[in-house]
Amino acid sequence: MSEPRRSRPGPTALVRAIVVLVLTMLLVAGIATIELWPFTGWRLYSNTKGPTSGSYFAYRVDRTGEEHVVDYHDLPYAYARAPYILDKFPRLDGEKRDALCSALAQGEREEGRPVAAIRVYWERRRVVPVDGERRTKLFERELYATCAQDDR
Amino acid sequence: MTSVVRSIGRKLDDVMFGAETPARLLVLQGGFMVFFAARTLVEPPHRLTPQPPGLFRPVPMIEFLDRMPPRSLVIAGEAVVVLAVLAWFLVGRSPRWRARGRRIAYVSAWIVFVLLATLPASRGKIWHRDLLLIWGSAPLLLAPTDASFNDRTPSRRTGWPVRSSLAFLAVAYFCTGFQKLRASGLEWIFSDNLQWALYWGRVRGDPPPWRELAFFIADRPWLSQLSAAFIVAFEVGFFLVLFFPKTRLVFLLGAWAFHVGTYLMLGLDYWFYAFVVTLVLVDWPRVADRFTGRTPAPQPT
């Protein structure tokens, strides 16, 4: 005769141990801010915001020497998060910087826009809400690097 | 003293591994499978290919790769997820193959979904969007797969995966709130922090769908601070759902308010967080029984 369902045993000791271990790892990563995806420090908007924000911006230089900001909306979806890599530009080694610049230049060229070089600027902007629209005002700008130069 | 410790131990054990109905487990398994397929189809990772190697920053799990995998391979992975989900539902009709078939389908879908999720996560910024789905569904990898929707007898055998899933969600939300307090302290709430966050919206990307609402809150410091207090209280307090089941409805409504709000005002797409919370927090078979007039199962202790 089988046991009534209500008294059936719960998980085995091994399953319990695995669940508790993984849960603890998730908690430790979350508390100690350890980033080992899919374990994460869960930093979502954790730093306070202010009226100003600084980032690195990439500009395409055309054959006439004119600069055009690289607009990621005009590039394939694979480029959508490139600005976040650009934000780490100073921390990248030479090889990675070249690879990033080449990628941006390649994307622009494939969209039919001429690229003589990519310039990376550090820019700081202030947000200005005007009549329900968000405007930003540039107040700090510094050329950080020029890369992906076409020597032709 | 020993009896107090033992009592706390029993309580924690019940929170993590207590009894729930097989019907509820089945709904969770089916729900997560639908989410795997939906997430894969709504935002297919093959859109990230081809990608120049310079934009690839692999997460530790796929550190051995030096670039995005080929498009054909990614599409094959997406197909595996969708087919595994279909198989999970089809094999459920066969009493003979149900248990084994569902396990193979669930484990396959989860593993391939996680592998696919490493791709959007390998673009230079931590990718949280899939994490609640990944972690909430993880305990079910080891769960029984022979549950029936008609079985309303609570047991620990079918209850522990449901309870553990809830515990994973609680840890995720708690840590998100904890990190805000750790990085910024109470200033995260009692300052102009949220005002500026709302004025900025997403620093890059399209404007949020309802910027007027964001500005309405941002223009009123008291409302901004109240909203910030709600966010932190919701995230840090989420673990209460484990110990006080009556709070679940409050946190369910809070999750929708929070995630819909962040979408409308900041343009951040965390819909699947709200979906996962809705799936796990609600005892859907019990809700269904209320509507169909079926005698509800006894409330699990």
Image (cartoon, coloured by chain):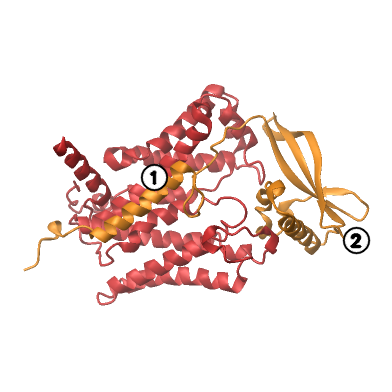
Chain colours: A orange, B red
User: Secondary structure beneath disc 2?
Assistant: loop
Q: Amino acid at mark 2?
A: Asp
Label 2 and label 1: CA atoms lie apart by 54 Å
Q: Is residue B251 left or right of residue A122?
A: left
Q: Nearer the viewer, residue B212 or B218?
A: B218
Instruction: Residue A77: give x, y in percent of width and height.
Output: 66, 58
Q: Residue B251's quadrant in the figure?
A: top left
In-image side of A113 versus B45 (left or right): right
Measured along the vertical axis of the image, is residue B257 above or below residue B75?
Answer: above
**On the rendered structure, is B198 left or right of B98?**
right
Residue drawn at point x = 38 percent, y = 66 percent: B106
Position in image of residue B42 (x %, y %):
53, 59
In the displayed structure, B172 sits above or below B134; it is above
Asked if residue B191 can be seen in this view, the reply is: yes
Pointers 2 and 1 within a single chain: no
Amino acid type, callout 1: Val
Is B184 drawn above or below residue A34 in the view shown?
A: above
Q: How many marks?
A: 2
Please state which of residues B22 and B57 is positioned toward the viewer in this rendering.
B57
- The residue under label 2 is A151
Q: Which of B271 and A54 lies nearest the eye of the viewer?
A: A54
Question: Which image quarter is the N terminus of chain A in?
Answer: bottom left
Residue farthest along the left direction in this orientation: A1
- Residue position marked by numbered label 1 in the rendering: B171
